[in-house]
Image: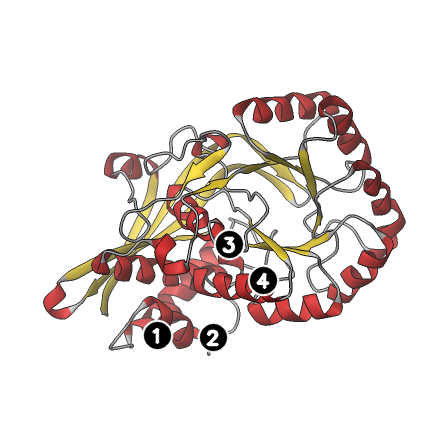
């Protein structure tokens, strides 16, 4: 294919409820979507969609939406447009000279790969190597104003059918909330915690108190650059340590595994530069006997479709954060993903298997920019 143009579209998606983590509270998502149009000679023209998971502010990572749009406009899109015989696999190679900007790169790769697969009539799941037609779903529960509010929220998610609960934690909101959930719902529910880098190695003994609750894992307790600190923490706590923000590529995943810094990896395609690198991380982890699961970044149905397909690969042995659409949005921009017996169905159509609903997309659009190439 040859890239003919890319549309940068900003949309504003209100959340059904505020979502609080150790680094801030979100009430709405400012999302950058990409629509890539490519010509394929006698095969005609192809169109694909990408979703950038960067947040409005550089709090979860150094990336943020305005910066992603800028680097795409000025550097990444022109570079990919210079590739004469383009496919999804060629995006990463073309963008390798540019440092960082994983979320922007991932969005562009996603759009190009979607266009390629739609043209070829192949599904996202088939391309990645999925082996299941549906995946079990967990849910991420934000920090609440009270333990009572938290327990009520967890009760609602369990009633809805979610098979795993993840609690966001931070200093001052950790042991007691976890204890309350265990006391209320028992030891049978799959339960894990996520600190989003809120602690330091000096908190190791305190974090070890969570060992009493039989958690699946403790996600990213220390700063992302402190891989050695995680290796030391893993010697103190019995709960398996899971890395999220620290993993930016298959290479960093292999290094963390070798150092003993993690027993589990949360794979977020946007954080690692795209779905093809996410698959490589899956392969590295599987080769070392490390469990992986698919994290979420409050994606719309576009990103959710790609994540569900990724989560259907054989090494994804733990339920991910691939929640139903109504967990975050009252109305998605695609046909909504609905929970069925605690699972989501893997899309089977060409490419992502779905596209934005035009009327709904228009309702939430705040700006569009067409880059002709």
Label 2 or label 4, whichever lies nearer to me, is 4
Q: In this view, does 7 lie above or below 40?
A: above
The quadrant the C terminus occupies is: bottom left
Secondary element at image label 1? helix
Could you tell whether 135 is left or right of 220 in the image? left
Q: Quadrant of residue 357?
A: top left
Disc 3 secondary structure class: loop
- Whole-number angstrom distance, CA of label 3 to CA of label 4: 9 Å
- Give the left or right position of residue 129, taking residue 59 as reference: left
Q: Which residue lies furthest to the right in this view?
A: 205
Is label 4 in a helix, a strand or a loop?
helix
Mark 4: few, some, or many residues within 10 Å (few <14, many ≥20)? some
Q: State the CA–CA distance, disc 2 to disc 4.
A: 29 Å
Q: Which residue position holds label 2?
A: 98
Q: Are the residues at dot 3 and dot 4 in contact (C-beta closer than 8 Å)?
A: yes
Label 3, residues with CA under 10 Å away: few <14, some 14-19, many ≥20: some
């Amino acid at each position: 294919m040859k890239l003919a143009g890319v549309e940068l579209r900003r949309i504003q998606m209100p959340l059904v409820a505020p979502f609080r983590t150790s680094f801030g509270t979100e009430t709405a998502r400012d999302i950058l979507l990409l629509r890539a149009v490519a010509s394929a000679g006698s095969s005609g023209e192809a169109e694909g969609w990408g979703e950038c998971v960067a947040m409005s502010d550089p709090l979860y990572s150094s990336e943020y939406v305005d910066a992603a749009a800028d680097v795409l406009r000025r550097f990444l899109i022109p570079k990919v447009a210079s590739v004469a015989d383009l496919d999804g696999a060629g995006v990463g190679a073309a963008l390798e000279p540019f440092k960082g900007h994983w979320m922007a790169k991932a969005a562009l790769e996603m759009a190009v790969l979607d266009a390629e697969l739609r043209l070829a009539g192949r599904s996202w799941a088939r391309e990645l190597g999925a082996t299941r037609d549906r995946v079990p779903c967990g849910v991420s529960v934000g920090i609440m104003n009270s333990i009572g509010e938290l327990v009520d929220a967890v009760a609602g998610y369990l009633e809805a059918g979610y098979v795993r609960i993840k609690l966001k934690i931070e200093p001052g909101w950790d042991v007691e909330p976890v204890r309350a959930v265990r006391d209320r719902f028992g030891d049978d529910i799959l339960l894990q915690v996520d600190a989003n880098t809120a602690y330091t190695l000096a908190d190791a003994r305190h974090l070890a108190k969570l060992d009493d609750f039989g958690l699946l894992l403790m996600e990213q307790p220390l700063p992302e650059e402190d891989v050695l600190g995680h290796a030391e923490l893993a010697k103190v706590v019995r709960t398996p340590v899971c890395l999220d923000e620290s993993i930016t590529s298959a290479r960093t995943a292999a290094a963390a595994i070798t150092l003993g810094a993690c027993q589990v990896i949360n794979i977020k395609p946007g954080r690692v530069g795209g779905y093809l690198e996410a698959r490589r991380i899956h392969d590295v982890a599987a080769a070392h006997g490390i469990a992986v699961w698919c994290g979420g970044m409050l994606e719309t149905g576009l990103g959710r479709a790609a994540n569900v397909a990724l989560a259907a690969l054989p090494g994804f042995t733990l339920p991910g954060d691939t929640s139903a659409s109504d967990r975050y949005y009252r109305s998605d921009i695609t046909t909504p993903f609905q929970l069925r017996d605690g699972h989501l169905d893997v899309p089977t159509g060409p490419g992502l298997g779905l596209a934005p609903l035009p009327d709904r997309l228009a309702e939430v659009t705040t700006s569009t920019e067409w880059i002709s190439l």
